[in-house]
Amino acid sequence: MALQLWETLKEAIIVYTGLSPPTFFTLLALILAIYYVITGLFPSSDHRHEAPRDFEPQMEPLRPPVQIGEVTEEELKAYDGSDPEKPLLMAIKGQIYDVSQSRMFYGPNGPYALFAGKDASRALAKMSFEEKDLTGDISGLGPFELEALQDWEYKFMGKYVKVGTVKPKVPVTEPSESTPRDAESSKPTEDGPSESDDIKNDPSESADVKNDEPPPKVDADKE
């Protein structure tokens, strides 16, 4: 039965294709191989739509930016990305921005992670990764560095939401030291006898004063 079916199939292949059975099956296998290669390189539209849906649950939605107001540099360090419950913040020229959407760059293990939680104005202007440049102090920068910093600021203003400002440092004024001369001038003079007291207490001087007075006139009629 099987042999009879095979003979019938061979005759049909020869009649309808003009090819020998071995040639026909070789060509059929080659066509199937090409089909699977092409479908592997270009997945179907259904597969393309399903892949993102499988990936979506793994991505957490970004939280809306929260305004934190004015904070000190020390308080800003708490937003360096080490705490996943807090937003990722960074400051430029005293203005704080929420960079949570770029956590891959500014978050832990990112290429710019050392800028997070700080005012990195000086480091960005100089394109420096040194610890000493991680500050908001931009004094002494050249025109090209200031221009580079301005470009960074425009980029942050257009991409991220401003959520606060860095509280400026108040310079501590030391009390001025008084000089010995000032101390002597401000020191009250010691109590001593005044000239009037000397005159009052010296009996000889008072006697001389009395002797200098003219003698009283004597009435001649009384004599």
Image (cartoon, rainbow, N blue to C red):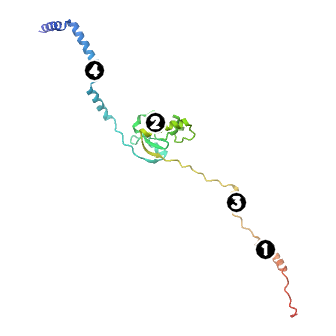
Image coordinates for residue 181, horizontal then vertical, percent: 70, 56
Q: CA distance from mark 1 to mark 2?
A: 87 Å
Give the amino acid at mark 1.
Ile
For mark 4, give the secondary structure. helix
Query: Which numbered disc flags the more N-terminal residue, 4 or 1?
Result: 4
138 with respect to 97 (left or right): right
Within 10 Å of disc 1 (Cα), the crowding (few <14, some 14-19, many 20+) is few
> For this rendering, which residue is in front, 140 or 129?
140
143 with respect to 188 (left or right): left
Q: CA distance from mark 4 to mark 1?
A: 129 Å
> For this rendering, which residue is in front, 138 or 115?
138
For mark 2, give the secondary structure. helix
Q: Quadrant of residue 190?
A: bottom right
Residue corresponding to mark 3: 185
Query: Which numbered disc flags the more N-terminal residue, 3 or 1?
Result: 3
Give the amino acid at mark 2.
Ala
Give the amino acid at mark 3.
Ser
Disc 4 or disc 3, which is closer to the eye?
Answer: 4
**Is 185 placed above or below 207 here?**
above
Q: CA distance from mark 2 to mark 4?
A: 42 Å
Quarter of the figure with the N terminus: top left
Contact, CB < 8 Å: mark 4 with mark 3?
no
Asked if residue 40 shows in the view, the reply is: yes
Residue corresponding to mark 2: 113
Residue corresponding to mark 4: 39
> Which residue is at 26% across, 17% downward?
35
For mark 1, give the secondary structure. helix
Q: CA distance from mark 3 to mark 1?
A: 29 Å
Give the amino acid at mark 4.
Thr
> Which residue is at 29% across, 19% downward?
38
Disc 2 or disc 4, which is closer to the eye?
Answer: 4
